[in-house]
Image (cartoon, rainbow, N blue to C red):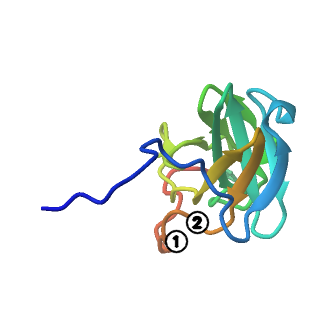
Amino acid sequence: MKVPFRRDRRTPPPAVPEGAVRVGPLADVPEGAVQRICQNPPIAVLRHGATVHAFEDRCPHAGALLSRGTARGDEVTCPSHKGVFRADTGKSIGEQSCRALRTYEPVVVDGVLYVNPAPREAREARRDVCDRISA
Ligand code: FES
């Protein structure tokens, strides 16, 4: 099998995804706090050092803004009824059973954070959302 000649075997630098939302310099994104970065679609980010998670900024239970909630590690707590979600996977955790948040791909290019507004996963059916969160 012939192996094509490659002069540079290093991984190419990440490219800015088409239609990506420019958030700004990564160093300017607050550490450990949920920050809304886009209205439509509603997207929030949570940064820990060089790690950034981007997720839907609307609670699937009753639509509260998670950017007004609190973060503890990678867990985000909804301000309305205290539903808890993983910022990295979007999964609902704790005693609640809720639809997962959509998550988005963050990309850092030359120290600037961008978020691809195309969700990583298809939207789940909204029929079976939030079994045990009392409104
Ligand atoms: S609106 Fe988020 S838990 Fe109810």
**Quarter-of-image position of residue 64:** bottom right
Residue 20 in the figure: left or right of residue 53: right
> In the image, what residue occupies the spot 77% across and 27% down?
31
Label 1 vs label 2, nearer the camera:
2
Judge the density around disc 1: few (<14), some (14-19), many (≥20) Cα neighbours within 10 Å: few
> In the image, what residue occupies the spot 83% across and 50% down?
23
Q: Position of residue 98 (x, y in %)?
A: 51, 55
For this rendering, which residue is in front, 13 or 118? 13
Mark 2 is on which residue type? Pro
Is 32 located above or below residue 23 in the figure? above
For this rendering, which residue is in front, 6 or 26? 6
Q: Secondary structure beneath disc 2?
A: loop
Q: Is residue 135 visible?
A: no
Is 33 located above or below residue 37 in the figure? above
Report the residue marked by disc 1. Answer: 123
Q: Position of residue 73 (x, y in %)?
A: 61, 25
Mark 1 is on which residue type? Arg
Report the residue marked by disc 2. Answer: 119
User: Pointer 1 and pointer 2: residues touching (CB < 8 Å)?
Assistant: yes
> In the image, what residue occupies the spot 75% across and 68% down?
41
Q: Position of residue 29 (x, y in %)?
A: 82, 36
